[in-house]
Image: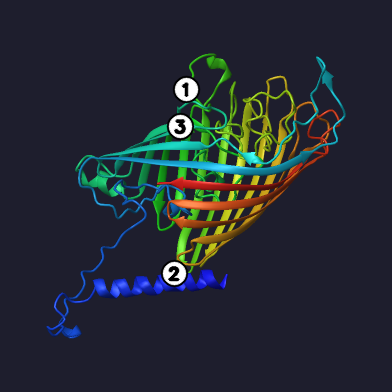
Amino acid sequence: MTRNLSFFAVLLMAGATAGAQNNAPADSTKPSRPDSAAPAPAPRPSLSFAPAIEIQHLRPNDKRGINVFENPKDDAVPYDGFKLNFGGAFTQQFQGLGHSNTAAPRVTNNVNANQLMQIGHGFNNASANLYINAQLAPGIRVAMTSYLSSRHHNETWVKDGYLLIDDSPLEIQALKTMMKYVTIRAGHFEVNYGDAHFRRSDNGNALYNPFVGNLIMDAFTTEVGAELYLRANGFMAMGAMTGGEIKGNILTPDDRAPAYIAKLGFDRQLNPDVRVRLTGSRYSNRKSPAGTLFAGDRAGSRYFFVLENTAATASAQASSGLINPLFRRSVTSYQLNPFVKVRGLELFGVIEQAKGVNAATEVDRRTWNQYAAEATYRFFADEMMFIAARYNTARGELPGMTEKVGADRSQFGAGWFLTPNVMLKGEWVNQKYRDFPTTDIRNGGRFKGFVVEGVVAF
């Protein structure tokens, strides 16, 4: 050991001597230039790890997009002609979850439908997004998001595409003045119901989410329609009408009706250290053959195969760990979201109630309630690290069950941004299912453990 250390020291000394000889002046007889006369070294250019934002009214895909909710109305990006911008995001998880239940055997065709599949530690399939944004005119842009790979679909498919208008294309002063307060979005887009969808993981992009999983009842869907916003002095009002389904459809017109969405809110930076936001949202669709407000995430759950039986197919288990209240036929839902940020501390809440039916044969509307409270603390060098905790509970009625059922989930997360585009985070999760009948696979169900996730977004 001593001989190795001595040899290493000799190498260091030899390297230092050689470096000194290489840096010596060519003619040692000439006097050296005084230090005061040495030319100043050229300043190193300032480098940014995040790409420049060239598209107006855009929420960045990287760390700069955290706690950005609606696309910003006030924008410092100047218009200097047509721009085409590409972005991407992808994630990879390592899962270490275990699960159990107490459901009674339910055998069909020699298969026990209540027997859980065996799961262990390992890598999940990666997921990826592609973003395309084009600046068409001052304040006018078009956006499209594609899922290149997801848990539910291995093939590439388009998630959404829409036109966003924040300025008048006509040089008419009345229109210019009106558009200082008005925003119009039209196309196929992620509906703006509640604020939780702004903080969730969206397939390949999980930078905004301080946890790995989303809520137990995950209100997220894309629909075809239009939104109208009025924003001034921190206040916001939004009204929208959509087709009420995840894709356009003209068949069975007597079975469908438009969905109406409304949102009111207040969001203001009170001082450099304190920001306060409070919004209330309503989503209503009185009839639809395929409503998906709580079943619209075709990307799939972050918790692979938990509480799934041995015969589950890939598409059937894509929402494992979630609860779908089954409001396919009609739904009216409300969500209230308080948000407070005091320096590095963020507090966010979800108070939600949804009522609806799954089929026309249901006489009475069923009710589900969901609550979530989370705290995130960001710290160290421009908030490049964070720790977080969330408690989430959901409870309500499902078709064919006489008693209310539900689930409770606790999550603890921590993460580190290596750069604004690269993040590593981990989560410990513990979810318990409540009051499911013994004939249901979720009876006495529970899963817990850890998931580690790496994210890149730009």
Observer-nearest of 185 and 344: 344
Observer-nearest of 288 and 114: 114
Residue drawn where x is 60% and y is 52% of the image: 426
Amino acid marked by disc 3? Leu
Q: Earlier in the sequence, mark 1 or mark 2?
A: 1
The quarter of the rendered structure image containing the N terminus is bottom right
Q: Secondary structure at mark 2?
A: loop
Task: Indicate whether 27 appears above or below 279.
Answer: below
Q: Residues within 10 Å of mark 2 (few under 14, many from 20)?
A: few
The numbered disc on residue 272 is 2
Residue 45: horizontal and vertical position, in percent?
26, 63
Q: Secondary structure at mark 1?
A: loop
Contact, mark 1 vs mark 2 (Cβ under 8 Å): no
Residue 447: horizontal and vertical position, in percent?
74, 42
Observer-nearest of 337 and 103: 103
The numbered disc on residue 148 is 3
Q: Kindly report which numbered mark, 1 or 3, lies closer to the viewer in this rendering.
A: 3
Residue 315: horizontal and vertical position, in percent?
62, 25
Q: Is residue 4 left or right of residue 232?
A: right
Residue drawn where x is 51% and y is 42% of the image: 91
Q: Secondary structure at mark 3?
A: strand
